[in-house]
Image: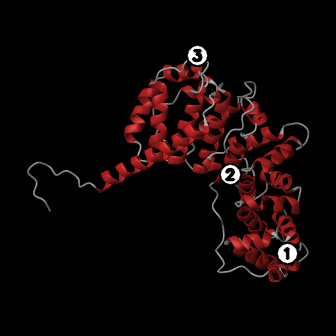
Amino acid sequence: MGDAEAEVGPLAGRLASVGSAMPEAHPTAEAAKLLPFLALEARADLQAAAVQHALALTGSEPGRTLLAGQAALLRALIELAVAPAPAPAREATRVLINLAADPGLHKPLLAAEPELLACLLGCTLDPQWPWAEEAAAVLANLSREPAPCAALMEALAASGPGESGLERLVRALCTPGYNARAPLHYLGPVLSNLSQRPATRAFLLDPDRCVVQRLLPLTQYPDSSVRRGGVVGTLRNCCFEHRLPVDLQYLPPDKQREPDADIRKMLIEAIMLLTATAPGRKQVRDQGAYLILRELHSWEPEPDVQVACEKLIQVLIGDEPEHGLENLLEVQVPEDVERQLQQQDRQEQEQCKREHQELELAPEPQAEGAAPT
C-alpha cells in the first residue's frame, strides 16, 4: 500500500479563525478602496488600519468570499505578510490564515500569488522571522487539500542546495528554540498533511535519517496539542507503510494517557492500520496491546474513541481472515455492505453516547445507612 494516499488528521485542519465577524459584507467597490492603503509604500498607520479592516471581513463567509474575489487585494495582503517591520505582517498573515481555512478559497489565493507557498515556507523556516508561527498556520490550512499539498512538496524540493526542505522542516519542528520568537507548533499539522504523500512517508521512514525517532518524543509534548496532534497524525499516516521502527513499541513507566480525545483516536487508528496485515496483527498482539486497550476502553469517556477502541480489540481477538484476505486494506467491500457498515458505526456511536449520558444523569449510590438529602 506504498502508493496509498493517507488521510489528513483531524487535528491538521483544526485551526482557529482570527478576528471578529462582520454583520454583513461590504460591497466590492468598498473593499477595493482598501487597496491604496495596503500598498508597501503606504503610511504604516494606514496600512495597519486597512489590514484590520480586512481581518474583520474574514470573520464572515461573505467577507472572505468578497476578499477572495479581489486578486489585487490578495496580492497586496500577501506582500505585507512577508514584509519587514513596520509593515503589519502579523495581521496580514492572520487574514491569510482565515482565508486559507476555507478550502474553496485556496484556488484564488494561489492564483493571486503563485509563489505564495514558497514565500510562506521561507518565512516559516527563517529562524529570525517573528511571525513564523502564523506563516506555518497558513501552510497548515492550505496543505489540507491535495493540490496545495503537492505544490508545497514542490516548494520544499526547490528550497535550494544542501539540506533538503523536508529535513529543514523536521529540524525546525524537532529543535527546541529553533525560532526564539515563534513556537512553530503548526509545523506539526503541516508535516501531518505532507505525510499524505508517498514521497514524504518514504523520507520519514528512511532508516538512515532516524526521523521517526526524532518525532516520537513530541507525541508527549505537553505544551501544545496542535504540535502533539500533528506528530501523531504523521505517525498514523506512516503506518500505511507497515514498517515503523521498534522504538514505537516501548513507553516509559510514567507514561500518562493522551488528554486530547482526537489524538487518542488517531493513535488507535494508527494501530488499526498496523493490524491490516497478518504480520502486523501478530506484532501488535505480541506487544500486549490487548491488555492496554482493554484498560483504555474501560476508562475512555468519549463515545467515538471508545467505538474505535472496540473495533481494534475485535481485530486483535478475532479469528484470522481466510487465505487471500489477510491484508484488510486490500479487501474489496461491496458498496451496499459498506453503507451498512457505516450505518452500523453511526448507530454504535449513538448508542455509546446515550449510555454515557445515562451514566452522567444517574444519581450516585448512597452509602448504606445514609439518609437522603
- Closest to the observer: 83 or 225? 225
Q: Quadrant of the N terminus?
A: top right
- Horizontal and vertical percent position of residue 103: 73, 58
In the rendered image, is residue 112 in sight?
yes
Of callouts 3 and 1, which one flags the residue occurring earlier in the amino acid sequence?
Answer: 1
- Horizontal and vertical percent position of residue 219: 58, 40
Could you tell me the amino acid type at mark 2?
A: Tyr
Distance CA(mark 3)–CA(mark 2): 44 Å
Numbered label tally: 3
Of callouts 1 and 2, which one flags the residue occurring earlier in the amino acid sequence?
Answer: 1
Res 38 label: 1
Distance CA(mark 3)–CA(mark 1): 66 Å
Query: Image quadrant of residue 21?
Result: bottom right
**Foreground label between 3 and 1:** 3
Query: Which residue is rendered at x = 62% and y = 28% of the image?
Result: 331
Query: Image quadrant of residue 24?
Result: bottom right
Of callouts 3 and 2, which one flags the residue occurring earlier in the amino acid sequence?
Answer: 2
In the rendered image, is residue 84 in sight?
no
Q: Residue furthest front?
A: 336
Could you tell me the amino acid type at mark 1?
A: Leu
Res 186 label: 2
- Closest to the observer: 79 or 306? 306
- Horizontal and vertical percent position of residue 140: 71, 52
134 up-or-down from 318: above or below: below
**Which color mode does the image show?**
secondary structure
Residue that label 3 marks = 323
- Closest to the observer: 174 or 307? 307
Query: Image quadrant of residue 208?
Result: top right
